[in-house]
Amino acid sequence: MQNRKRGHQTALWTKSFTMLVIASLFLFMSFQMLIPTLPPYIKSLGASGFEIGMITLVFSVGAVLTRPLIGYMLEFRPRKPLVLIGAGGLLAVTILYPLTQIVTILLLFRLLHGLMWGWSSTVNGTAAVDLVPNERLGEGMGYYGLSITVGMIIAPSLGIYVYQNFPFTVLIVISALLGFIAFILLAFIQYHTPDNILIANRKNLQFSIVDSLVEKSSLTPAVITFLATFGYGTIVTFIVIFAEERGIAEIFLFYLLNALTATLIRPITGRWFDRKGPIQLVAFCSLLTFISMWMLSFSSNWLGIVVAGTLFGAGYGSLIPALQAWVLAMTPHQRRGVANGMFYSAIDLGIGLSGLVFGLIALFVGTAQLFQISSFFFLIVVFITLSVGKKWQKESETRKKREFLL
């Protein structure tokens, strides 16, 4: 394993961790380019509102279905082959999309994409945890989460631009190229598999769908993650359609300002988590996200998009990494693969069900009203987070005392 000591502080930016962050950025960009562009693409093929919602839901179902298996495998398998299988699978499925314009077959491809995404996101997140010093977990996963956040924000704006100006096949070529670069980088990383994983006897580990999908110790922040991403799902599914309705050509600015803001404040929010815990941070970021979605719903020009995107980057861009660090901080080391899978399943289920539910609601209300309605889920997140705050602080103090005695 690489030398982690640097002065009196344990080193975070090892070569392997740095490469993993960069590779994850390319991988998430490859994936996220298709998120806002597939709904309008299948709409152009004649898909109904229900089918547009289904394009998000079937993906989420696929991601959730594969995570019990990969969570189980992470308890006894080395990291590298699992990482490369996930990245290679994502690349292969991406290339399939231009092969048909039949909506039902596209839905099948989307299901396969979800299966590989569930695999890859769980394995890569766990590989990142293995490389991060435990005492810098919030900061390290914050930076890893930044690669996810920036990928989620820059790639959609790039995808929207390409989709609006070039044939759909060009979008797929760029997405596949980013995925290929990610695969090459991931192949050269020196991974760290914990000793207790390497010596684990597979025969002594019984596979259980529930145990491989749910980690009870960190279930509360996972539920909060589901609620937050359910509120966010309307942005993923309808923001391009919203821009077309309002005639806003500069909708890419929402994602661009989102990325810039999330990047600039990430060092602050990561240290905030490590020093003060997740409660105030999660509540504050959720409140900012609520405000930003209302700003977006009233936007009719580029200026409103800039303000909404900036607030959204400060809020949601910091919220998801904070929730992931919270999940992992509550979880025993040997169960972090399962907890990571549960976290990503909460994200995928939240976004997928949101696309379906609000796709049906869209039959009765305008797109701007969808943003307003879904924003109230972030107020629910604030309420639940503050409600469990005292219990979290007490458990955290007890855990620290136990670790000190040991």
Image: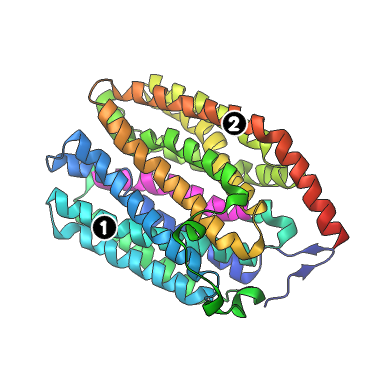
- Colour mapping: rainbow
Percent coordinates x, y for residue 281 in the rendering: 66, 36
- Dot 1 lies on which element? helix
Q: Quadrant of the N terminus?
A: bottom right
Percent coordinates x, y for residue 229 in the rendering: 45, 39
Tell which of 213 and 45 is nearer to you. 213
Tell which of 406 and 172 is nearer to you. 406
Q: Quadrant of the C terminus?
A: bottom right
Q: Amino acid at mark 2?
A: Ile
Query: Which of the two discs, 1 and 2, sits closer to the camera?
Result: 2
- Which residue range is magenta in the image? 141-163
Determine the residue positioned at 62% across, 71% down: 15
- Secondary structure character of the magenta stretch overall: helix
Percent coordinates x, y for residue 102 in the rendering: 12, 51
Percent coordinates x, y for residue 193 in the rendering: 60, 74
| Horizontal arrangement in the rendering, residue 38 relative to residue 251 (left or right) | left
Compared with residue 40, is residue 127 higher up or lower down, i.e. above or below? Answer: below
Instruction: State the residue position of label 2.
Output: 384
Could you give the CA–CA distance between mark 1 and mark 2, rounded to whole angstroms? 40 Å
Q: Residues within 10 Å of mark 2 (few under 14, many from 20)?
A: some
Q: Residues within 10 Å of mark 1 (few under 14, many from 20)?
A: many
Quarter of the figure with residue 373: top left
Determine the residue positioned at 30% across, 25% down: 367
Compared with residue 26, is residue 44 higher up or lower down, i.e. above or below? Answer: above
Instruction: State the residue position of label 1.
Output: 172
Q: Inspect the magenta stretch and tell me whether residue 152 lies in it.
A: yes
Q: Are marks 1 and 2 in contact (CB under 8 Å)?
A: no
Q: Amino acid at mark 1?
A: Ile
